[in-house]
Image: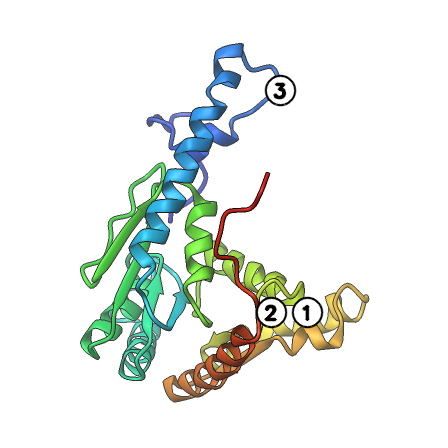
Amino acid sequence: MERGGATAHDEHELTLDEELLLWLGDEPPEVRAADAARVHDIATEFAAGFSALASVGAAVTVFGSARTPREHPSYELVREVGQCLGRAGYAVITGGGPGLMEAANRGAREAGGLSIGCNIELPHEQAPNAYLDIGLRFRHFFARKVMFVRYACAFVICPGGYGTLDELFEALTLIQTATIRHFPTILLGGGEWNGLLAWLRERALADGRIDPGDLGLISLAAEPGQVCEIVDAAWERQRAWVASQRRRTAPLRP
């Protein structure tokens, strides 16, 4: 991810997300008229992601810091998680970048599992890591986020920064609102999350902003084997629930 905010001297060609969100309300007609092309670009990106990942079986999305060096203990722990998931037959999906994303992809590939990276166009380039069997590059954050959720049966949240926390709370919101079912969100790393969990209990829960059951949406794991046990149990529940649902097989009528 980009380190730090943009500065007044930060000159680069705008990414599609930057340009899309650069809206002040007094845009000239030609900018407004380009919205049809923007919608087409967005649809094309979704279609490309769906096509590339349609044949992927059970998968787990792993999030974590792009800045963690290979000699850090968290790198080896996440690599072992990738290995455990790969041996269990799960594909591993990450943001495709360096750090803990690389560690998860590397572990999955070493174990013979499918390793997938969904990279993102940033103002400052994030290169894909070298351990990807399927590497995709998205130009819109929201399209990429859909791939992380649609093709996964669980999230593993490793130590990270703003991007990792964004994915954590987005997953919890989707589960809380029953948009996705039986979908574990697993916090990895011993005492890494104690401060965040204490804040949720002592502030958000105590003030009635979340319910006691909402805290139960979070699972904790300190070891790779614990991650795989949680994922296996959830995957069986998901399969049973999906089998009972009617799925759309044709376009919606206007």
Pick the front one: 27 or 99: 27
Camera-nearest label, 2 or 3: 3
Q: Colour mode?
A: rainbow
Distance, label 2 to label 3, CA atoms, is: 38 Å
| Left or right relative to 184: residue 71 | left
Res. 2 in view:
no
Residue drawn at point x = 38 percent, y = 25 percent: 9
Which residue is outermost to the top? 29
Is 104 situated left or right of 179 in this image? Answer: left
Disc number lying in front (1 or 3): 3
Question: What amino acid type is highlighted by mark number 3?
Answer: Gly
- N-terminal of the two: label 2 or label 3? 3
Where residue 146 sits: x, y (%)?
A: 46, 54
Q: Residue at x 60, y 15 (%)?
A: 26
Q: Earlier in the sequence, mark 1 or mark 3?
A: 3
Q: Is residue 247 left or right of residue 68?
A: right
Question: Which residue is under mark 1?
Answer: 200
Q: Give yes or no for contact between labels 2 and 1 (Cβ–Cβ under 8 Å).
A: yes
